[in-house]
Image (tube, coloured by chain):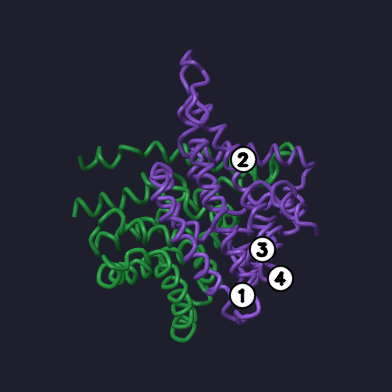
Chain colours: A purple, B green
Amino acid sequence: MSKLKIILNGIIKENPTLVLVLGTCPTLAVTTLAVNGLGMGLTAMLVLIGSNVVISLLKNIIPDKVRIPAYIVVIAAFVTVIGFLVQAYFPDIYNALGIFLPLITVNCIILGRAEMFANKNTVLDSLCDGIGMGLGFTLALVVIGSVREIFGMGTWFGITLTANLFDSMTIFSLAPGGFFVFGCVIALTNKLTKGRVLKNHQEGGCAGCPAAASCAALHGGESQCVKAGEKEE
Amino acid sequence: MREILMILLGAVLINNFVLIKFMGICPFLGVSKKLDSAVGMSVAVIFVMTIATAVTYPIYTYLLYPNFAYLQTLVFILVIAALVQLVEIVLKKYIPALHATLGVYLPLITTNCAVLGVTILNIDEGYTYFQSIINSIGAGVGFLVAMVLFNGVRQRIEGNDIPKTFQGLPSTLIAASIVSLAFMGFSGVVEGLFG
């Protein structure tokens, strides 16, 4: 695969948020404003690039049995460092992201890419994958954030669009609006890609993700978790 | 007593972890299809959240703060991961019946952002040790309430004829939006009761 193809793969074909449906929590929580979505996306992208490169470098050193804890340590270290950088240079974004900044550590996208891509591929490919997936995540967050900001506050990146001619629908900025807009954006992606989201879900798009058991359970009931539940019965 | 009830009800109803604070969305969407797995997962979450808070709070207060506060995220996630493993081993050895019920859900909880979230939030909010434990139990019970309610909603959706584009995840998310809307009705209730 060429480098460009890897990057484009993350942005469009396997968009982590809209096609693989990973990292739903930050997607819903921080997208009240487009600029927060952009901040979250770029922060997660930096963590993803860092962790992908380091994990890919260490792939032959980390013993297979303890790889998940090892990945988590690498990711948590990057989250801490990048959290400080955001706090120092972008205090507004830092305050807006709040608890969801440290929670990037448990974002399935990052752990998922470590498990699915970085531990099997070269450093350069992993770097490209980090950039692509990060951009895809950012793009999705900015789209959802824009829709919520335009409807919820009548502004886009802080620019007033409606000229205060009519009241904005505050509900879009609140929790229910988050679920609603995310649902609609996924439906739209589904329509545009002729059902790829749906198909991916039935195949268990993130089966390789270590967190798949909990998050991929929505993939048409194919997850280990639901299976485990059935076995038990 | 009043304060404790306020924290508890606040965590269950008003700042519901799933529906208002958006933590633990993955299991909420994934494991809510069947009632027994929804309840099993939620009980495991309550259990782990409470123990995780009981352990991480003193670690932060007495070991990390103030010199090593920056290690919070790293230490907390490792402690939670180790704790989940430990709980699993102990349950398997001593209470096999409980392990059979909760065992399958325990490993999934390590990377559940609600657990790491509640431990960090307790520190951020400046709760005391006891208040933190109450808040964790409340957050877990809130998760259970959301899961059970949403399971009911999903069972209603199941047999319906939904446009192809909206089948699956989109319709589930829009249903979650309506349940979340219902939970917004609780805002102000606790202040009304105790204020």
Q: In this rendering, would B46 be left or right of A149?
A: left
Q: In this rendering, would B187 be left or right of A130?
A: left
Q: Earlier in the sequence, mark 4 or mark 2?
A: 4
Residue nearest the observer in this picture, A159 or B40? A159
Chain for disc number 4 = A
Badge 1 amino acid = Leu
Q: Under tag 4, what secondary structure?
A: loop
Residue, disc 1: A58
Residue nearest the observer in this picture, B96 or B123? B123
Report how far apart the C-alphas of labels 4 and 2 lie in the structure. 33 Å
Checking the image for residue A120, the label placed there is: 4
Q: Under tag 3, what secondary structure?
A: loop
Expressed as whole percent of the image width and height from the top left, the position of residue A18 reads 66, 46
From the viewer's perspective, is residue B75 above or below residue B114?
below
Expressed as whole percent of the image width and height from the top left, the position of residue A112 reads 62, 62
Badge 4 amino acid = Lys
Q: Earlier in the sequence, mark 3 or mark 1?
A: 1
Label 1 near label 2: C-beta < 8 Å? no
Q: Earlier in the sequence, mark 1 or mark 4?
A: 1
Q: Earlier in the sequence, mark 3 or mark 4?
A: 4
Badge 3 amino acid = Ser
Checking the image for residue A183, the label placed there is: 2
Report how far apart the C-alphas of labels 1 and 4 lie in the structure. 11 Å
From the viewer's perspective, is residue B110 above or below residue A165?
below
Comparing labels 2 and 1, the label whose residue is closer to the camera:
1
Expressed as whole percent of the image width and height from the top left, the position of residue B107 reads 53, 71
Residue at mark 4 shares a chain with residue at mark 2: yes
Residue, disc 3: A223
Residue pictured at 54% horizontal, 67% vertical: B108
